[in-house]
Image (spheres, rainbow, N blue to C red):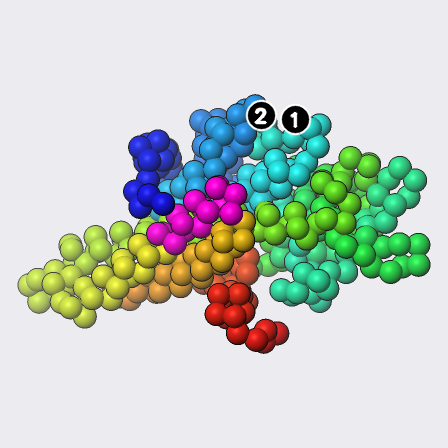
């Protein structure tokens, strides 16, 4: 593994940074507070090809890997524009369809992912299942040449701005017995699909929703991959999600640290900049160390995934996501502390990051479940859950 990024990856980062800087955190928070979407930014980074860097070339993408898409995600967040749907639409959904979809499904969806003209949400979470994907209750059954989907999901991001939702559901047989899960693409205008917003205390243009599937009828080609192979296919999509979540968090942390360092250099009290005091400087330096360690593990996870080492990538992706979430939560908190009262003033743009940086410790997988994974698989300790 090379510990420096390629010139192409560095150029990609610089290009995304330039675009995002023209919008900035003020644009992002203004849109979020008004209940509007960051459609202009999404459309531009899509038109320039940055959302499609990991889509295969034959479908209009850049032919790169998840590491390239993670770099895009990180630089957007580092510029104060963390686009949550980059984790879901091109990363999870795009990866699953590229790896397991039929040729017709690839031709239908991947060019839109590459150009940013198509968005897709991802639905796995259920109220009674929590982190236990084996307890999913949403079901799918055959009805002639159709699928019938029944159940519900919650905390599903961005449903009001996507074209379809990639849903994880368990098959049921004629006796009602639940079988293995599968992945199905459900258009958001499908009859029988209802979604309701969940009110959140997080400043973000992407909203969260509860979904209800009331015997939603889908064509045979709504199924992605093999029937009943959903768990294997699902986990192939969750590694990119964790890698992207890590880059989302490190980008947020970099944004907050840059604001704090600038403030510490320029804010003078008792005749010297506050950054001259170790009580201010050392905590920020510790944050810098945490961020760089998390970025390095994220690069390792992406390199493993892009080389086809799914099992090793799973371990690294979980570690990267954990480290990045901790770095983001710590750094945002410290950046606010450095600013004093100004840290919670809208003018400085840090208070709005509290919720979203803290969310990284919970979603898309909680820090506790990651520690369970590391204890069991890395340390080979007895399973505790």
Which of the pair 212/271 is nearer the observer?
Answer: 212
331 and 93: which is toward the camera = 93
Q: State which quadrant residue 187 falls in.
A: top right
Q: Name the residue under label 2.
A: 59
First in sequence: mark 2 or mark 1?
Answer: 2
Could you say where residue 360 lies in the image, as x and y percent from the top left?
A: 47, 59
Look at the numbered discs 2 and 1 and tell me whether their residues touch, using CB distance below 8 Å. yes
Q: Does the magenta stretch include residue 298?
A: yes
User: Which residue sits furthest left?
Assistant: 271
Residue 39 vertical placement versus 197 (above, below)? above
Asked if residue 36 can be seen in this view, the reply is: no
x and y, in percent, of residue 310 in the image: 54, 49
In the rendering, which numbered label is found on residue 107? 1
Nearest to the observer: residue 270 or residue 295: 295
Is 167 covered by the magenta stretch?
A: no
Which residue is at a point 43% across and 38% down the rendered structure image?
68
Placement of 244 over or under 135, stated as above or below: above
Residue depicted at 53% across the width and 25% down the height: 57
Prevailing SS of the magenta stretch: helix
Q: Give the range drawn in magenta.
A: 295-309
Residue 294 image offset from top left, x and y in percent? 37, 56
Observer-nearest residue: 223 or 44? 223
Question: Is residue 369 at all visible to an observer of this figure?
Answer: yes
Element type where label 2 sits in the image: helix
Q: How crowded is mark 1: few (under 14 residues within 10 Å), some or many (20 or more)?
A: some
Left or right of 169 on screen, residue 20: left
- Quadrant where the image shows the C terminus: bottom right
């Amino acid at each position: 593994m090379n510990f420096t990024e390629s010139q192409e990856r560095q150029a990609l980062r610089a290009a995304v940074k330039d675009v995002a800087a023209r919008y900035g955190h003020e644009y992002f928070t203004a849109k979020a507070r008004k209940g509007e979407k960051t459609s202009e930014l999404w459309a531009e980074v899509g038109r320039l090809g940055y959302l499609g860097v990991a889509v295969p070339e034959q479908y209009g993408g850049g032919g790169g890997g998840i590491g390239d898409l993670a770099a895009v995600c990180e630089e957007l967040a580092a510029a104060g524009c963390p686009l949550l749907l980059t984790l879901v639409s091109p990363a999870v959904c795009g990866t699953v369809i590229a790896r397991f979809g039929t040729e017709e499904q690839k031709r239908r969806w991947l060019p839109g992912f590459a150009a940013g003209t198509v968005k897709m949400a991802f639905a796995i979470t259920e109220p009674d299942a929590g982190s236990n994907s084996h307890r999913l209750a949403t079901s799918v059954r055959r009805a002639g040449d159709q699928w019938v989907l029944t159940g519900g999901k919650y905390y599903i991001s961005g449903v009001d701005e996507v074209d379809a939702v990639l849903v994880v559901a368990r098959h049921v047989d004629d006796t009602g017995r639940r079988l293995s899960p599968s992945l199905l693409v459900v258009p958001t205008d499908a009859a029988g699909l209802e979604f309701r917003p969940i009110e959140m205390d997080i400043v973000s243009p992407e909203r969260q929703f509860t979904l209800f599937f009331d015997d939603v009828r889908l064509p045979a080609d709504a199924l992605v991959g093999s029937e009943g192979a959903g768990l294997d296919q699902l986990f192939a999509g969750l590694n990119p999600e964790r890698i992207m979540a890590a880059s989302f968090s490190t980008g947020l942390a970099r944004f907050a640290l840059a604001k704090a360092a600038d403030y510490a250099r320029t804010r003078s009290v008792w005749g010297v900049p506050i950054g001259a005091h170790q009580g201010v400087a050392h905590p920020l330096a510790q944050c810098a160390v945490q961020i760089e360690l998390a970025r390095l593990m994220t690069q390792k996870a992406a390199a493993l995934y892009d080389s086809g080492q799914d099992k090793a990538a799973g371990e690294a992706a979980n570690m990267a996501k954990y480290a990045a979430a901790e770095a983001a939560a710590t750094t945002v908190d410290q950046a606010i502390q450095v600013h004093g009262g100004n840290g919670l003033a809208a003018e400085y743009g840090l208070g709005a990051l509290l919720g979203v940086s803290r969310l990284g410790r919970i979603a898309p997988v909680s820090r506790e479940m990651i520690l369970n994974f590391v204890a069991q698989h890395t340390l080979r300790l007895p399973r505790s859950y």
